[in-house]
Image: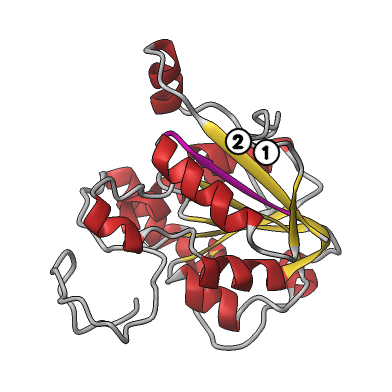
Amino acid sequence: MPEPTDAPGTPRPERPDRPIRSYVLRTGRMGSGQKRALVELAPHFVLPYEARPLNPAVLFGREAPLVLEIGFGMGDATAQIAAALAGTDFIGVEVHEPGVGALLQRIDEAGLSNLRIVQFDAVQVLEHMISPGSLAGVHVFFPDPWHKKKHNKRRLIQPPLVQLLQSRLSPGGYLHCATDWQPYAEQMLEVLSNEPALRNTAPAYAPKPAYRPLTKFENRGLKLGHGVWDLVFQRV
């Protein structure tokens, strides 16, 4: 894990020279099944962070499109997408152990062979483990919206990360973001639209692609009249 001197959940002072991280570490409870999955399945499906590019063909034993997901939460949507798109390989990046354990359980239950996990900061994974132009797609679903204005600078989708993401996409590759917080959707649209290497696939927000399943939380929100905004941009 990055910065091992930090106790989990310990707040750190803001530093103006600190690079943007893809997460804020929070504590979480793990069930016995998640703990068992971490012990038994992590050696097979969790990749150690290494500051050198992955070789997807060796990793998955085949040549296939590669999609990276940043912050998969508890992994429900990730596992469903990987099961539905068996011809695509997936790497999910998440720092929270309960989510990693939960996704490992789903990998085992569904018998998925096209999904791997990296438990590390996504920015460093992108910089050092993902080769330029190697990704067919990137998924960023429901990142922390940081509702308070003074915390907006902590939001993940900002120009430096978007520039890094587009550099890892192959020509024609896509970046798919989704949020249920309208101010964040508006910021995402502005930031993504200002990246010259990307073009919007819709006039503004995109219809939900069929491959992205509805989460229980999202479905409940839609029934209450809450909005969800998808943005799908393509590398030119």
In terms of depth relative to the viewer, which is nearer, 73 or 43? 73
- Residue 48 shows up from this direction: no
- 93 above or below 14? above
Q: Which residues are magenta?
A: 174-180
For label 2, the crowd category at 10 Å Cα-Cα, with few meaning under 14, some 14 to 19 and many 20 or more, is: some
82 left or right, relative to 224: right
In terms of depth relative to the viewer, which is nearer, 152 or 172? 152
- Residue ID at (53%, 85%): 50
Q: Give the spatial CA distance, label 1 vs label 2.
A: 5 Å
Q: Horizontal and vertical percent for residue 115?
A: 63, 54
- Residue 179 drawn in magenta: yes
Q: Which residue corresponds to mark 1?
A: 83
- Residue 48 drawn in magenta: no
Contact, mark 1 vs mark 2 (Cβ under 8 Å):
yes
225 left or right, relative to 114: left
- Residue ID at (41%, 55%): 100
**Quarter holding residue 225:** top left
**What amino acid type should be assigned to the residue bearing mark 1?**
Ala
- 134 above or below 28? below
Q: Which residue corresponds to mark 2?
A: 80
In terms of depth relative to the viewer, which is nearer, 13 or 158? 158
